[in-house]
Amino acid sequence: MFFGNRVLFAVLICLFAVMSGIAEASEDQASASTATISGHITGYPSDWFPPMYVYARNVNTRSTFAVYTQGSFDYTAEIPYTITVCEPGTYTVFAWTDRKISGVWIGGFYSRYDEKGSIEPIFVEVELGQEVGNVNLESNMFNVDQDMVPFP
């Protein structure tokens, strides 16, 4: 009886090892077929953060990926987000409130001011298997003409 338990134990250990290898291969394959874009929303132009959707849109294929972020009543908070995308390319990152605030939708996009003082988008290059961080949406990115912000 003791020998039978040893064999059973050995079989279970081997099975576990094989299953672990399969799980690792699946995770590696999944990470090689996706990429992430992450950052945070900070300095939203109000004394609170409304819940928002953050989007990443491939500028060539127009494929759009999104993530929902919770709001906060702490206006100094940094609201983190991570978007998983499943195709390489050049992305524009933007956000919209999940509902109208005082009767209007409020959006912003990952951007900067050029040397003339005009706002221009910052595009994010993504390769599969890559993690792109520090794509932060800051207060000046929401203080723009709302027609400039891509719509989901």
Image (spheres, rainbow, N blue to C red):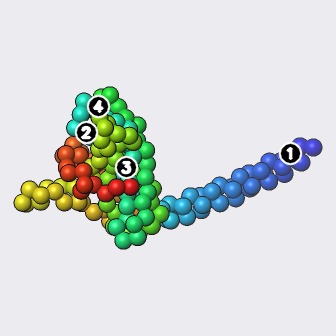
Q: Is residue 56 left or right of residue 8?
A: left
Q: Amino acid at mark 1?
A: Asn
The Cα–Cα distance between marks 4 and 1, rounded to whole angstroms, is 61 Å
Q: CA distance from mark 4 to mark 2?
A: 7 Å
Disc 1: which residue: 5
* SS at circle 3: strand
Q: Earlier in the sequence, mark 1 or mark 2?
A: 1
Q: Earlier in the sequence, mark 4 or mark 1?
A: 1
The residue tagged 4 is 48
Whichever of labels 3 and 1 marks the residue nearer the N terminus, that label is: 1
Q: Identify residue for label 2.
A: 44
Q: Are marks 1 and 2 in contact (CB under 8 Å)?
A: no
Q: Residues within 10 Å of mark 2 (few under 14, many from 20)?
A: many
Q: Amino acid at mark 2?
A: Tyr
**Label 4 packing within 10 angstroms: few (<14), some (14-19), many (20+):** some
- At horizontal 39% and vertical 42% (from top left) the residue drawn is 98
Q: Position of residue 113 (x, y in %)?
A: 14, 56
Q: Are marks 4 and 1 in contact (CB under 8 Å)?
A: no
Of the 4 image quadrants, the one containing the C terminus is: bottom left
Task: Give the spatial CA distance, label 3 vs label 1.
Answer: 54 Å
Which badge, 3 or 4, comes first in the chain's sequence?
4
- The picture places residue 77, in percent across and down from the top left corner, at 30, 34
User: Which label sits on residue 54?
Assistant: 3
Where is residue 117? Give x, y as percent. Answer: 8, 56
Q: Are marks 4 and 2 in contact (CB under 8 Å)?
A: yes
- Most extreme residue toward the right is 1
Amino acid type assigned to the residue bearing label 4 in the image: Trp
Q: Nearer the viewer, residue 134 or 22?
A: 134
User: Under tag 4, what secondary structure?
Assistant: loop
